[in-house]
Each structure stands twice: as structure tokens, then as C-alpha cells.
Amino acid sequence: MKKANRILTILMFVFLYIPMVVLIVASFNTGKDITQFEGFTLKQYTELFRDEDLLGLLGNSILIALLSTAISVTFGTLAAVGIHRLKPKMRKLVMSLTNIPMTNPDIVTGVSLSLLFVFVGTGLLGNRESLNFGTLLIAHVTFGLPYVILNVMPKLQQMNPALTDAAMDLGCTPVQAFFKVIIHEIMPGIVSGGIMAFTMSLDDFVISYFVTGSDFVTLPVEIYTYTKKPIQPKVYAMFTLLFLLIAVLMVGMNLLQIRADRKKDSKRPESRGWRIAKRCVAGALVVALIVGGGFLFFGNRQEKIILNVKNWGMNMADGTDGTLDIIAAFEEKYPNIKVNMSYYESNEALYSQLKNGGITVDVIIPSDYMIDRMIKEGMLEKLNFDNIPNFRYVDEEPFKNQNSYDPTNEYSVPYTWGTVGILYNSKYVDEADVTGWELMWNENYAGKILMIDNSRDAMGIAQYLLGYDVNTMDKAQLQACADKLAQQRPLVQQYVMDQIYSTMENEEAWIAAYYAGDCMLMMENNPDLRFYLPEHQGFNRFTDAMCIPTCCKEKEAAELFINFLCDPEISGANMDYICYASPISEAKQYMEDYLAESDIIYPSKEVLAKGTAYRYLSEETSRFVEGLYQNATKTVDASGPDNGWIVPAVLIVVMAGTMVLLIVTRKRRKL
Amino acid sequence: MKKNKSVLLSVPYMLWMLAFTLIPLCVVGYYALTDPDTGAFSLGNLQDLSMYLPVLGQSVLYSLISSLICLLLGYPVAYYIAHRGPVAQKILYMLVMLPMCMSFLLRTLAWVGLLQDTGIINNILDAIGIGRLQLIRTPGAVVLGMVYNYLPYMILPLYSTLVKMDDRLIEAAEDLGCTPLQTFGRVILPLSVPGILSGITMVFVPAVSTFYISQKLGGTDTVLIGDLIERLFKQGDNPNLGAALSLVLMLLVFVCTGIMNRFGGDEEGGVVI
């Protein structure tokens, strides 16, 4: 029995630590892929220390954890003393209030706080930037406080109440009694509560994810967006270093504890020197953390204009693989502007983020149909073209003339254009099967198909397959498309956007529908990949254009940025990295020849004529399509009864049932 | 005199908690009961939820299974740790704590690298001639992810109950002629019920509401309620329906923990690791 227990324990530790070993090994890998160890290197570590952004994010995380812990500890300890003195009934009530954030799922806490902040901040107070550093801090304090209270309360209850009385009899004021007596008795509780609050805050992802604004992002939230894009190996290096740091801290704390226990046993009083040394070390640690966090935080925050840009993932050259680092070039030209880039995965996600409110964004790059929608809903600012002289470089046809989304050319400046087609791996996919969009429904490749994860593109593919107009508002046709998508679901490996990169490149999936430019990029990394455009059925031809939303703060700087990106030389260098087509013909001469001449990026006029652009339908249709799409792709088989009243009824029954149960059991206990 | 004054210390705290826990929940309720288009009162969102019932059922099922597996795995481990010497106990306890302090996003991602079709495990299986298996994107992978991430939440409360248990009770049972199995069934197990209940709660609550684990390790058929809420808020442009789902999730969790606390005879203080 004992032996079995020991083996099980060892196995459990292996289970717990294997993934961490994988990550640590990956940090020394020369290759990018976590599954293939190609060679040993320390490159990731040097790159990590050169990456100011990543270190800044770590600094942000530490700063918010320190601040929120400091506030929760002070506030919580005082509150605990107060609660301790409350009448038992009242105390019970307060403690159940304390338990709410403990028992509530994180996602509900996050959602509820973000709704509150936007509801009060934007709805009632009219503050556009209602999700910011302050609200993030409030959220962290709110979930840190209960840890402090729940750790301090038991210590207060264990404390001999005569101690306080004795102190006061000896002439202490209540405040003095607190600082001279009580605080020493409850110190262990304060410390363990503080440590818990700190670690919870440092590693919190779910709550921060919902309440975070654009001005202050913590490391876990950024890692979430990293894990959607191909993850940079330097993140593993950071993981390894943090792991070592925490391991050393924990071992150190335990050693001190063991030592202290031994001391207690031998009843020898602690020497004065040792005590002072301990305090010095603790003090130095706290100071170092605060200074370090503050330095990382304020170091990046000189008196500069912060320009918040929201972009698609992998959609602007960032200096990797010998390309131009566009942001760095821009900041060099305009030293008083700092660009803060964040990402969205689809037009719908961007729309949703702006509509939910609470954030400031200065530049966005949505696609045609979404621009149309945003113009109609008054979400975009008119541009001042005096600040964007480079607009003259943008091709007349088809961008300035007869464009479907911004016919008066007042709100947008084209950034890229392209097509949506199929990317497949020729190693596994039979060329004979590559006949059209039906490849995405081919059962021979079940489980190896990646479907594009946004309602408009996915519905569009079904529409091309079924031969419908992609801009139809006919509900029966839309329903038929949704049915087609639902039929596809068992064959689909995953619904993805940016994740497509790693999955297609390492051959985890074989077929995907995606944007031509990104496909080109992936083909560079895996020579077996091929791109196919189903010309006979039709395909989407899109334009992504830069706009300034009404929630912007730095309109002029935003226009400078847009102008900068329209410089043919910059645009060309940018396309070298993102592999999309530039709306500026002159940019071609600055692009790599193989890209400028590629018929994937620049299809011929005849081919392009077979493509169609999505147009904005109506708000009602958009919502209808979104609902259809979600239901077709994101539910388990909804073959249940079609009765809308089940949920409300079940809710009421369950609530009533619990009430009765709780009352009955309470009564029984009293007897 | 002094008594009255220090009671006042709790007032700002109560106001804070009201403002940032109770009122936000009311706001969720408000959103759940309003129509996304008109802003008028409506039960439409709750009605729409009925199509998500299978998702709800699936979430509860997976998290219950995970809690059970965690219990079966965690109990012997906690028992083993609780019966080591003081130094070994500290070290083992620390080893259980340590993974909890590291980014759970990255640790889950490591599992993707291990489990995927072209992943580490399958590469090994392929190399030794077994061939590749479908490991990832199955309900099993989601449950594995939950067990992996939340197992420490089970071990720690179990450990603190078991370590407090009076060894003399066990000796007494043995002296009175109990077989080891009887001792376990009649003495040890009943005494560890509070730990079991708080462990199950601490695994069940995060598991039922997770969205990252199912997004990374699950397939198209393992959608969980957390996924839906995340999508409705972040992509689907329907916060009202998302609020309604959050409301359901919250009620579900409160009902579960309420029942647990009632039968566990938990007094004030709640769950502390």
C-alpha cells in the first residue's frame, strides 16, 4: 500500500513537471518548433534581454501585483480587525460577501467587472477610456482582498483578547495597541495572505483579459495573444528564468522556515544580528522589486505621445528575418511618438472591442465591408488629408474610384489588398481532389482541415460553394450556408485565425482556407504548401484600409502614421514581410522581385475579375449571420427540444430547489 | 467606546466589496435581461440559451469527471505527503505549489506540443513502431488539461486535512481490530470529508468555467461554456447573450458550492489553501 502510494506520488510529480521540462528544453532550442529539438543555443536569452517590450510587460505585471498586494494587505488587515469586532450575524454576512470573488468563476468576475466599468465609466460618466490602469488595479485589489481577510481572520480569532486589554491597561491608545501588540500576533496571516494575493495577481490571466484597456497590458494577457500567433521562443526563455527565480525564492523561504522551526525547538533566542540581517534582506527585496518594477514601468513612459494602433496579427514588418522594423523607423522619424501596437483576430472581433467601449484606439485596419459598417454607424472619424500627402501614391483604380466601402474617400486609406483561397499540403493532399471549395468538405481529409474562424469569411466560402451571392440578405440562403457549415464541422480540426501558421507549417493540418498573403508567408517556411484559388466558383477579394475610430485621442499623430505607411518605399518594405499586395503600384519597385511578380499576391486582371468584395449588409443581417455562424460551428449537437422556455424554467426550479434544500437542512441541524 | 470605533474599520471594506462584487453581478443581470438591439427588458437572451444546453451539460460533465480523477489521484498523494517527516513534507508541499505559480497558458501550450499529431508523444510512438494516435482534440485531452492544471488545488486542501488528523484515532481503530481497509473506510475517509469537499469545489469551479484549455486541447466538438462566453464578449458582438450565459454559470457554481458547504458543515472562513 505504502509502496503503491510512493509510486503514484512520483508519477504525479512526473506528470506535473513534464510540460515545464518541455518548455525549459524549448528555451535552449535553435529551432522555433517546440516539438523538434534542433540544437542547443543561448540565443533566446540574449534576445529576451534585448526585447524592451517583453521586459516592459513583465515590469507591468510586477508593478500591478506589488501595488495591488500593498493595497489589499493594508486595507484587508484593517478591515479584518473591524470585521472581527462585528456581531456574529453581521460578521457572517460580511464573510459571505468576501467569499463571492473566491467562489465565483474567474470569467464571471472578469465579465462582471468589465461590464460595470464600461457601464458606469462610459455609460454614466462619459469617459471614453473607462478601462485603464485604475480599473485593472481595482480588479486586482478586489480579488486579492479576500485572500488577506481569510488568512488574517483566523489569526485574530486565535489571538488572546486579553492581550489587547493588557496593552491598553498599560497605557496604550487603541492605535498603539494595534501596532505594538495585535499586528505581531497576526503577522503570519498577513504575510501568507499577502503572498497569495501577490502570486494570484502576478499570474492572473482571465480577469485581466476582460478588464484590461489599451494603455496598460500585463504579461499573461500578452502571452495569450502570443499563443495565438506563432510563439516566439524567447517567451520560453522568460518562462525558464521565472521558474528558476520562483524555485529559488520558495526554497529559500522554506529553508528559513525550517531553520526557524529548529530554533524554536532549541528555545535559543534569535540573535539580534540575525534578526537585523533578516529584516535588511526582506527590506532590500521589497525595495528592489518596487524600484525594478517602477523603472521598467516608467522607463518606457517618457513624455511621449502614445499612439494606440490595433492591427491584425503578423500584419506589419517588425524587423525579423532582415525586414524593416516599421515601428522603429517611424519612431526614429518622429521621436516624440511612441507606437503601442495591439492585435485583433477578425473584423468582427475588432468591431466588438470598439463597440464594447472603454478603450482608446487611434488607428485600425479593418476590411472593406467592416469600414462600410463603421462609417454607417458613425464609428469613424473623417481624415484630414492635408496630413496625408502620400495618399496621392495610392492607385486610382480600384481604390479611389468606385470602391464599395468608402465611396467618397473621406474615412479610409488603403493598406493592403488580397484574396481568400485554399492552402494545402501537396505531400498529403491528392492534386485530383483540388477542384474547388468542396476540398474543404472532403471527408478523406477529416480532422486535417482548418476552417477560417470568422462569420463573414466562413459564410462566404459556403456561399461560393453553393453558388449564392455573397452579399445576399435572403434568410433561407443564409440558413442553407449555415447548414453547410454545420455539416462541415465534424471534418474540421479547428476553427482558427492566426494559429493557422504553426499548425500548417508543422503539418498538423493539411488544408486551410486563408488570406493569400499569409499563405505565401507559410509557403516560404514549408515548401510543400501550395495555394489554390477556386476561380470558377468565385472567391473573396478584400481591401484592408487604415481608419481612425471616433475613440481616438491622437488624431494628428495617427494621420502622420498613416501617411508614413503610404510612402512607397515603406509600403514596399512592409509588403516584403507580410506578403500582401500593396495598393500603391510604385511600392512594387521596392519589393523583392519574386513577391512583386508572384501571381498569388498579384493575380492577373482576368482572375481578379472573378473575385467579389463583401459589402456591408445591415445590422439585423449581420447579427443574424453571426448567430447562424456561432450556432453552426460552436455548439455541440443541438438536437435537443426546440423549446425556448426550458432554460428560464430550469433556472427557477433549480434556484427554488436549492433554497428549499438549504432551509430544510438548516432546520434539521437546529434540532 | 473602543469597540464601536474599530468596527467602523470594516465599513470601507464592505462598501468596496458591495461596489465591486455585488453590484457588478447586478449589472450582469441587467445586461442579461435586456435586448441587445432595443435595450428594453426582455427574456429573449434566456430563451436563446436553450440551444446551449448541450454545451452546459458537456461542461459540467467534463469538470465532474476531472474533479473525480483529481480526487482519485490526489488523495493517495496527499496521504503520502502528510505522512512524511516535517522536512520532506515541506519540500513535497513546495513541489506541488510550484507549478501553480507558473503561467498556466504556457504550461497548457506545452501539452499541445506533447499531444498533437506531429507532437512529441506521437513522434516517439511512431519511432517505436506503434504509429500515431489521435490524442489531441478529444474530450480526453480536455479532461487531461483540467486534471493537469487543477490537480494541485485538490492536493493542497486534502493535505491540510490529512496532516491535522490525529494519528491516535487510527491507532485506536487498529487496536480495536479494524483491518486497514476498515480503518480507512470508517475513520480516515469520514474525517477527510471537509478536505475532499473543498478540493472538489476548488477543481470544479475553475474547470467548469475554463476556456483556454478547451480552445487549445479540445476539438470542434468540445466547446465549453467558458468558450462561448469569451467568444460572445470578445468576438461575437453579443454581450447581452454572454451576460445571460455568465449568469447561468454563476448560478450553477453557487448552487454546487452551496450544497457542498451545507453538507460539508463548513463554518465561516470558507476555502483557504
Image: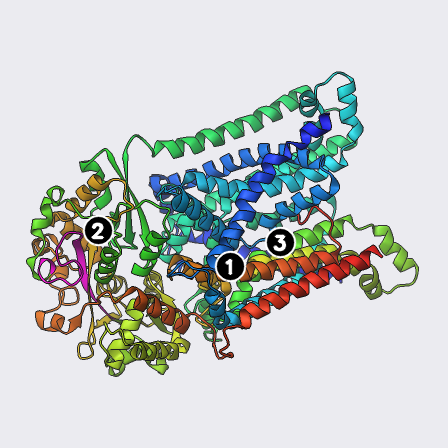
Total tally of numbered discs in the picture: 3
Same chain shared by disc 3 and disc 2: no
Q: Which residue lies furthest to the top in this view?
A: A171
Q: Which residue lies furthest to the front in this view?
A: B40
Residue beneath disc 3 = B153
Describe residue A584's horizontal placement relative to residue A320 as left or right: left
Is any atom of residue B115 visible in this view?
no
Placement of A524 over or under A40, stated as above or below? below
* Viewer-side residue, A579 vs A563: A563
Residue beneath disc 2 = A547
Which of the numbered marks, if any, corresponds to residue A664? Answer: none
Question: CA separation, marks 2 and 1?
Answer: 34 Å
Question: CA separation, marks 1 and 3?
Answer: 23 Å
| Element assignment for label 1 | helix
Q: Quadrant of the N terminus of chain B?
A: top right
Placement of A566 over or under B205, stated as above or below? above
Instruction: Name the residue at 50% across, 64% down.
Output: B225
User: Residue A98: horizontal and vertical position, in percent?
Assistant: 62, 45
Q: What residue type is labelled 1?
A: Ser
Q: Which chain carries label 1?
A: B
Q: What residue type is labelled 2?
A: Cys
Instruction: Name the residue at 71% across, 59% down.
Output: B76
Range of residues picked out in magenta: A399-421
Residue B88 inside the magenta-drawn segment: no
Q: What residue type is labelled 3?
A: Tyr
Q: Mark 2 lies on which chain?
A: A
Q: Which chain carries label 3?
A: B
Work out whether mark 1 precedes mark 3 in sequence or the reverse, and give the earlier one.
3
Residue beneath disc 1 = B246
**Local crowd at mark 2 within 10 Å, few (<14), some, or many (≥20)?**
many
Residue A412 inside the magenta-drawn segment: yes
Placement of A113 over or under B116, stated as above or below? above
